Image (cartoon, rainbow, N blue to C red):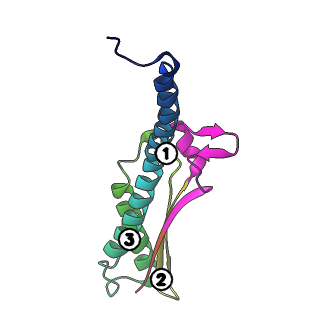
């Protein structure tokens, strides 16, 4: 008694594997390539919010307006530096951290910006006709503000 696949079916498994593998690889590549930008954005959001929170602790009554502005901005910048210390060295130099306190409106605005082109040094970008993975905006940016 002969067992196995009929002659007409011998290559079907290889063709099915090739088709399924392409789909599987595309999904896996998409998950992996979007994970770092999403992690960076979450970290940027967290660090800007924490910088604003910690800046509230500066006592305004013991300082002049100019000294208070300097102190608040320094606290915010120090928090950003601390919170973003895990960012890979290849990208860290491109991260732009700003903390600006407006004395007249008493508004502190903390911003972290990273040009998406800086990510190409640590992660490959797949460019196919009609699609780029990951497709990112020009800048990854997070901002938090608080009016004291």
Asked whether the residues under the numbered discs 2 and 1 touch, taking CB atoms below 8 Å apart as contact, a structural biologist would say: no
Q: Position of residue 77 (x, y in %)?
A: 41, 63
| Residue beneath the point at 32% across and 78% down | 58
The residue that mark 3 highlights is 49
Specify which label sits upstream in the sequence, 3 or 1.
Answer: 1
Q: What is the secondary structure assignment of the residue under circle 2?
A: strand
Asked whether the residues under the numbered discs 3 and 2 touch, taking CB atoms below 8 Å apart as contact, a structural biologist would say: no
The residue that mark 1 highlights is 30
Question: In the rendered image of this protein, does residue 66 appear above or below residue 29?
Answer: below
Quick check: is 132 in the magenta stretch? yes
Tag on residue 107? 2
Specify which label sits upstream in the sequence, 2 or 1.
Answer: 1
Quick check: is 12 in the magenta stretch? no
- The residue lying toward the viewer, choosing from 29 and 148, is 29
What residue range appears in magenta? 115-142
| Residue beneath the point at 33% across and 75% down | 53
């Amino acid at each position: 008694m002969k067992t196995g696949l009929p002659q007409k079916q011998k290559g079907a498994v290889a063709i099915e594997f090739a088709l399924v593998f392409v789909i599987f690889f595309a999904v896996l590549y998409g998950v992996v390539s979007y994970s770092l930008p999403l992690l960076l954005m979450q970290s940027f959001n967290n660090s800007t919010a924490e910088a604003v929170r910690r800046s509230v602790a500066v006592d305004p009554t013991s300082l002049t307006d100019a000294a208070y502005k300097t102190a608040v901005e320094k606290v915010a910048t120090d928090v950003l530096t601390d919170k973003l210390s895990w960012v890979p060295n290849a990208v860290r130099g491109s991260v732009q951290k700003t903390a600006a306190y407006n004395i007249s409106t008493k508004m502190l605005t903390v911003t972290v910006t990273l040009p998406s082109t800086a990510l190409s040094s640590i992660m490959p970008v797949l460019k196919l006709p009609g699609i780029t993975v990951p497709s990112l905006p020009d800048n990854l940016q997070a901002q938090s503000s608080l009016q004291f």
